[in-house]
Image (cartoon, helix red, strand yellow):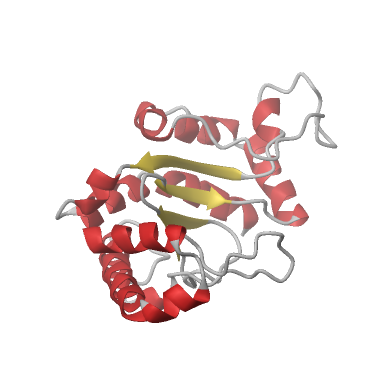
Amino acid sequence: MISSSTFRFLKDVKENNNREWFQANKQEYENARTDVLNFTAGIIKELAKADITIPADLDPKSCVMRIYRDIRFSKNKTPFKTNFGIAISSNGKNFKGPGYYIHLEPGKSFIAGGTWFPESDELKSIRQEIDYNSSDWHEIVDEKAFRDEFGELDTEGKLKTVPKGYSSDHPDIEYLKLKSFTAGRQLSDKELLKADSEVFVSEKLKKLNPLMVFLRNAIS
């Protein structure tokens, strides 16, 4: 489970986003980070049971993202993130291709999975796989349990025109216009604060596995 003190720390960071406050409250940060690492370890243990690409002994430290923001090229100069990000793949957060993501932020938490803005060669392969194996694709994205849990795929960055090599009357043209292939759902604070939240979140992530397998097969 996520401790209420971790969410309280994140709220405090949002209200006091400066290095002086953070240094004075460094122990609260360390406590919150330890809490998130323990939560991540529980997720990995459960997720590895369903996804053979996730090592059961994957180090949670390789999955939890830094709280320090890269402000070099940003107009927003606040030094700290107001969330904890967790990215899980066979290589932790440093992965290319499909992966799982957990965003922990009071009132704004969510999970997601898939591949986010893949490189052009991978994007071409995914589109080709959808074109060639439409029935397999629809078996995943049209499945009732998947839609009940995640709804439609994310349409961020979707093309307004038809991708090269496909016609506008292609039955799956709306999917072929996508530039990312991810699905997700919101998580309430209550869901994350309950005692068995690692199992609860893992069960939600496992429902993304068929999408992950399809995408991995497409780019392998």
Q: Residue at x 34, y 49 (%)?
A: 206
The residue furthest top is: 169
Q: Residue at x 33, y 78 (%)?
A: 30
Question: Relative to 204, is 164 on the left or the right?
Answer: right
The residue furthest right is: 164
In the image, residue 168 sits, relative to residue 103, either above or below, namely: above
In the image, residue 152 sits, relative to residue 113, either above or below, namely: above
Question: Relative to 86, is 182 on the left or the right?
Answer: right
Q: Is residue 84 visible?
A: no
Quarter holding the N terminus is: bottom left
The x and y percentages for residue 50 are 32, 56
The x and y percentages for residue 45 are 27, 66
Viewer-closest of 165 and 38: 38
Res 15 → quadrant: bottom left
The x and y percentages for residue 175 are 64, 32
Viewer-closest of 92 and 67: 67
In the image, residue 43 sits, relative to residue 115, either above or below, namely: below
Question: Relative to 10, is 114 on the left or the right?
Answer: right
Q: Residue at x 74, y 47 (%)?
A: 124
Q: Is residue 82 visible?
A: yes
Res 58 → quadrant: bottom left
Viewer-closest of 15 and 169: 15
Viewer-closest of 53 and 2: 2
The x and y percentages for residue 90 are 46, 69
